[in-house]
Amino acid sequence: MQILLPILVIVCAYILGSIPFGLIIVQLLSGQDIRQVASGRTGGTNAFRAAGFWAGLGTGFFDVLKGAGSAWLARWFFPDYAWLHVLVPIAAIFGHNYSIFLMERNREGKLRFRGGAGGAPCMGGAFGLWAPSILFIFPIGAMIFYFIGYASVTTLSAGIVATIVFAYRAYLGLSPWQYIFYGIFSELILIWALRPNIARLMKGDERLVGLRAKRAKQREERLHSSSSNSSSSSS
């Protein structure tokens, strides 16, 4: 019984993480299948692309709750077991990225599990372990999203900031040192999920968002306008 209960909680966290809120919300608001839009992921960024601001916000909110809820569950059932506090929200992130509800076969007939990239449940898990962590993870992520202009880098920042926050708190003796591994393990999951995006970043082909995307669009419009004026003058 002592072994079965931790396993049961981890499995429950995986199932909770597997709930594809992005798929559900986008389907309800626009009738689209989010898996057929842009990156095909079910997270908040792609929900925003598929069905607009409110779809993205709602998806992000519920995906954060998946991570937070799993961490609260672990801390409630096992208040003295720091490793389970780490592993349970990690299971939720894993479920979000590889959802049992989005199991399908690819063209080669191989089984695969679809989902998101894990940024929102990663932030949620950190929030569940120590609520004020969101005051660091969210603003830094928002600044990266708007000023640096890459959604993938924003997602990757969640695990990095969580690692730094929990390492500093462990150094001060304010939280278990095991919480550091929550940030490390979650960051490894994010990196694995974002392999295609990292490859595009290396090539300089990653999609821009935020301020840089706006400026790039303005430059294109100016170039198009000047090109049109030149054509009119020459004719």
Image (cartoon, rainbow, N blue to C red):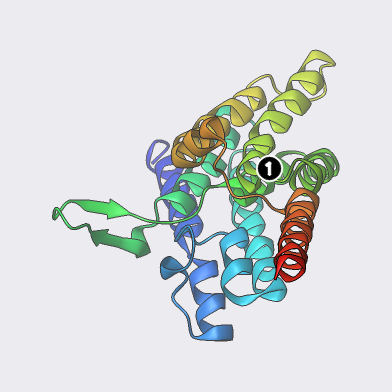
Residue 233, above or below 180: below
Q: Quarter of the image holding residue 130?
A: top right
Q: Position of residue 177 (x, y in %)?
A: 68, 19
Q: Quarter of the image holding residue 58?
A: bottom right
Q: Which residue is drawn at 45% across and 58% down?
A: 18
Please indicate whether residue 100 sits to the left or right of residue 164 in the image. left
Q: Position of residue 13 (x, y in %)?
A: 49, 51
Residue at the spot of label 1: 154
Please indicate whether residue 7 sits to the left or right of residue 121 in the image. left
Q: Position of residue 216 (x, y in %)?
A: 73, 52
Q: Quarter of the image containing the C terminus? A: bottom right
Q: Residue at x 56, y 59 (%)?
A: 43
Disc 1 is placed on an element classified as helix
Pick the front one: 1 or 23: 23
Question: What's the amino acid at mark 1?
Answer: Thr
Res 76 seen here:
no
Q: Which residue is drawn at 65% across and 58% down?
A: 65
Pick the front one: 147 or 128: 147
The total number of labels drawn is 1
Q: Where is residue 79 in the image (x, y as percent from the top left)?
A: 65, 37
Residue 170, above or below 73: above
